[in-house]
Amino acid sequence: MKRHEVYQAPAEAAATASTEAKAPKFCDKDYDLDTGVVYFSFGNGKTLEFDSNRTSEEIRKTLLLHGASQKIGDSFAGAKGNFALGVQSAQDVIEQLYAGAWTASRGEGEARPRLAELAEAISRIKAVILERATAAVEKASDEQRKAWRLNAKVKSVIATIRAEKAAKALEEAGEQELVVAGI
């Protein structure tokens, strides 16, 4: 039985192993590649199974295409309007899947969302189009990107970008009530 392993980061594993009383995770999902069964284990102890073999060929194909759409779509979720980064991220995942790899190996480099943020800062500082800044950031070594991040102007612009994103999220949130017990 080739069951999918759910990755848990070291920090999450330590938190999970903690003796503090903590609410259980709402739902853990897992699947078995050999049997085609998906398992849903809810925090209240209830477990559900979905057996893909009990569906029609059309539904299985729809599920496959939906999964591909989600997998590839997740790759550019952090691009935030940076088309060069979004297209490259999607292309990387497509090629990785064609090569038979579900997950890409992460090298020493930074994650894509952090590269996008650095590229946006450089684009603003140097007054160049975002695609040009993105290309420069992607070609740079980790040492060069680290040096750029230590630059006071870059730090300031990244802080501004983050503040703008937070302000936009607040605006989009509308009139949400904040409920705090005891206050």
Image (spheres, helix red, strand yellow):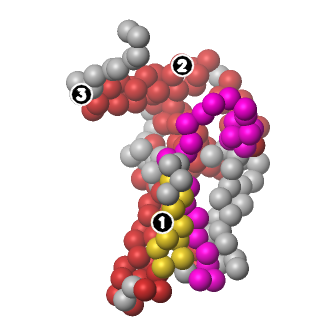
Q: Is residue 174 above or below residue 116?
A: above
Q: Quarter holding the N terminus?
A: bottom right
| Numbered circle sitting on residue 177 | none
Residue in view at x 45 percent, y 78 percent:
64
Badge 2 element: helix
Question: Which residue is situated farthest in the top direction here?
Answer: 183
- Does 51 lie within the magenta span? no
Residue in view at x 51 percent, y 31 percent:
121
| Numbered circle sitting on residue 156 | 2
Badge 3 element: loop
Residue 154 is left or right of residue 106, and the answer is left
Residue 130 is left or right of residue 19, and the answer is left
Q: Amino acid at mark 3?
A: Gly
Residue 152: image quadrant is top right
Q: Residues within 10 Å of mark 2 (few under 14, many from 20)?
A: few
Q: Quarter holding the C terminus?
A: top left
Sequence order check, earlier mark of 1 and 2: 1
* Image location (x, y in percent) of residue 97: 59, 74
Q: Residues within 10 Å of mark 1 (few under 14, many from 20)?
A: few
Cα–Cα gap, marks 3 and 2: 28 Å
Residue under label 3: 174
Closer-to-camera residue (76/138): 76
Q: Is residue 172 above or below residue 79?
A: above
Residue in view at x 51 percent, y 22 percent:
159
Residue under label 1: 48
